Image (tube, helix red, strand yellow):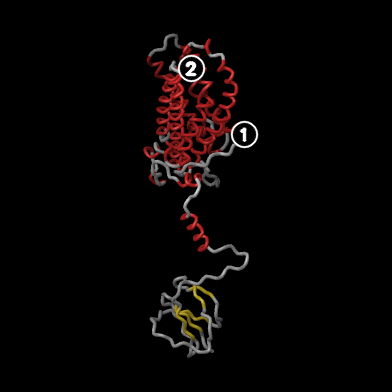
Amino acid sequence: MAVTVLVCRCGKRISAHGATPGRVGKCPACGAVLQIPHGSASTPEPEPTVPRSADAPTPSSASPLVYHVMDAPVTRTPDRGVPPDNQSRSADVKRRKNKKPVGLIERLEEWEGLVRRPEPSESGFWNGLLYPFWDANGLAFLVIFPIMWWLIALPTFEYLSAVVGGETGAIGPPVKFLIPSLMGLIIVSGYTLAYLNQVFLSSATGDVRHPRWPDLDLWELVRTVIRWAWVLLAGFLVGGVPAWMLLSSCEEPQTLDWIAFGAMLAAGAFYAQVSFVALLLFDDLLAANPVTVGLAVWRTGLSFLRPFAFTVVAATLVGGFLVMILHISNPFLAIGSWLIFWGVAFYAALTAMHLLGLEYHRNARALDWFRGSGRSPS
């Protein structure tokens, strides 16, 4: 009885007893897929001279059927109901990637922004300053949200500007628009804060791309506003209340009193920042507690001071810009200044959230919040 012997491309000889044409197997040496060729097996092919490995099996018959498998590995034809193989999937993906965008929305999604987006390993503080300009989502946020806030908040802030300038007697008609303006501000504030939360969570995973815009879910917007209010309340209790008690106890505050006052406010703001990180990642209001925040600061040292310093500087500049606009008496100049103000404010907010998320990503192993829990900041 003839014994079928397959010779692989790597030189390995495999003895296939009782193999039938069309049978498929793998080479034990290189892992290549081998198949018994179809055709008549009655006439054996002459065996060519090939190098023989030491561990090759000796044919049990004097007239072996020797086949040299030199073609590419053979894959089985998928059965009915079986999904396409990986090769066809990769071809479909490649076709989709090579397909040029047709519509405006598709072109915007493929656009990479005004600045080249860095790789995750290249992301750092200075690259993070250009985060809003990396792709279409960031630039859309800088264009759409300032205009939206400018339109909705203009009556409210114009009223505040008139109050600051002492012109409350001449602002009767705009007061009618204050109630719808405030209602619009609440909804827009929730959606804006929800997107900023997504920016932080996306950056906390090390992703340098802008996240998708959140869904317009009313309950989720309410939860977002509650989270931010809870964090601000925690920071006020830690730093604001002691600072207020210090000033109220001093009849004439001196230089050291003002320094202590500023240090207490800074401590409260820093506590609010770290508690914000814990609250969003754990998705629990109780995570913003002194034990969690204290352990985080203990394990990471002063790492979170880098995004905190940027936040303080940005908030100071934005606040100074706000005070300057409130004192502008020319209405046309004030209207244009408000639009610029919102653009600067949202650039600072986007960048601050991204830097804060990156800082957590760098210190995630040191914080050790989710080890063994199967959870992630996504």
Indicate the secondary structure of the residue bearing disc 1: helix
Can you tell which mark lies on residue 115? none
Q: Nearer the viewer, residue 269 or 163?
A: 163
Q: Amino acid at mark 2?
A: Ser
Q: Position of residue 133 (x, y in %)?
A: 42, 39
Image marks 1 and 2: residues in contact by CB distance under 8 Å: no
Q: Nearer the viewer, residue 25 or 154?
A: 154
Q: Position of residue 207 (x, y in %)?
A: 46, 44
* Residue pointed to by mark 2: 161
Q: Amino acid at mark 1?
A: Leu
Identified at 57% across, 37% down, the residue is 283
Indicate the secondary structure of the residue bearing disc 2: helix
* Residue pointed to by mark 1: 218
Q: CA distance from mark 1 to mark 2?
A: 31 Å
Identified at 55% across, 71% down, the residue is 76
- Give above or below for 33 relative to 243: below
Total numbered labels: 2
Q: Nearer the viewer, residue 329 or 375?
A: 329
Q: Residues within 10 Å of mark 1 (few under 14, many from 20)?
A: few
